[in-house]
């Protein structure tokens, strides 16, 4: 299966990009929405994700890699609640603001725009490349 791309939302007051960089890896937990959980279940090691700060920031700030297959959240008794492990790859040279994403017609069908409440959002390869270009990253191979 080929690499897939995702956007993972986090409230920077709870767990920010800088926390992920400091920790070197983390368990991506706290997802309860059924659609977001479905997306988590589709993740595989090697997939990449943009870390997106919600709240007042509303911008993608860094790139991360999924480093585990999905597994039940060890801190929850509900086996439907799953997590994945992620590690930081690189900060975005220029964070990409939600306003800039919404203003770009290439993102008209992007789940971040259409389903703004989802904390885990799939990103098409074309959207991924466009987001990286907006962030000042030449390609996902960097």
Image (tube, rainbow, N blue to C red):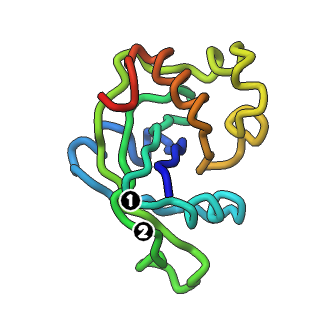
Residue 114, quarter of picture? top right
Residue most toward the front? 1
Q: Position of residue 66 (x, y in %)?
A: 39, 54
Residue identifier under label 2: 69
Q: Position of residue 113 (x, y in %)?
A: 73, 32
Looking at the image, residue 129 sits to the left or right of residue 93; the answer is right
Rendered residue at 62%/64% (across/down):
37
Residue 55, quarter of picture? top right
Rendered residue at 56%/20% (across/down):
97
Q: Decide: marks 2, 1 in contact (CB < 8 A)? A: yes
Can residue 9 be seen at all in this image of the molecule?
Answer: no
Q: Position of residue 21 (x, y in %)?
A: 25, 41
Q: Secondary structure at mark 1?
A: loop
Q: How far is mark 2 from mark 1, CA to CA?
A: 6 Å
Most foreground residue, 69 or 73: 69
Residue 105, quarter of picture? top right
Q: Position of residue 130 (x, y in %)?
A: 55, 21
Looking at the image, residue 104 sits to the left or right of residue 125; the answer is right
Looking at the image, residue 59 sits to the left or right of residue 35; the answer is left
**Crowding near pointer 2: few (<14 within 10 Å), some, many (20+)?**
some
Residue identifier under label 1: 45
Of pointers 2 and 1, the one earlier in the residue sequence: 1
**Crowding near pointer 1: few (<14 within 10 Å), some, many (20+)?**
some
Rendered residue at 27%/54% (across/down):
25
Position of residue 78 relative to residue 71, above or below, is below
């Amino acid at each position: 299966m080929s690499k897939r791309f995702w956007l993972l939302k986090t409230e920077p007051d709870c767990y920010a990009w800088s926390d992920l960089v400091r920790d070197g890896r983390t368990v991506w937990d706290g997802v309860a929405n059924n659609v977001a959980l479905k997306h988590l279940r589709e993740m595989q090691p090697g997939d990449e994700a943009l870390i997106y700060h919600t709240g007042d920031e509303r911008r993608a700030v860094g790139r991360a890699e999924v480093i585990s297959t999905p597994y039940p959240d060890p801190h929850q008794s509900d086996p439907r609640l799953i997590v994945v492990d992620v590690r930081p790859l690189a900060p975005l040279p220029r964070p990409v603001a939600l306003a800039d994403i919404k203003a770009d017609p290439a993102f008209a069908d992007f789940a971040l725009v259409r389903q703004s409440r989802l904390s885990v959002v799939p990103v098409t390869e074309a959207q991924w490349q466009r987001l990286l270009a907006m962030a000042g990253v030449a390609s996902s191979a960097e």
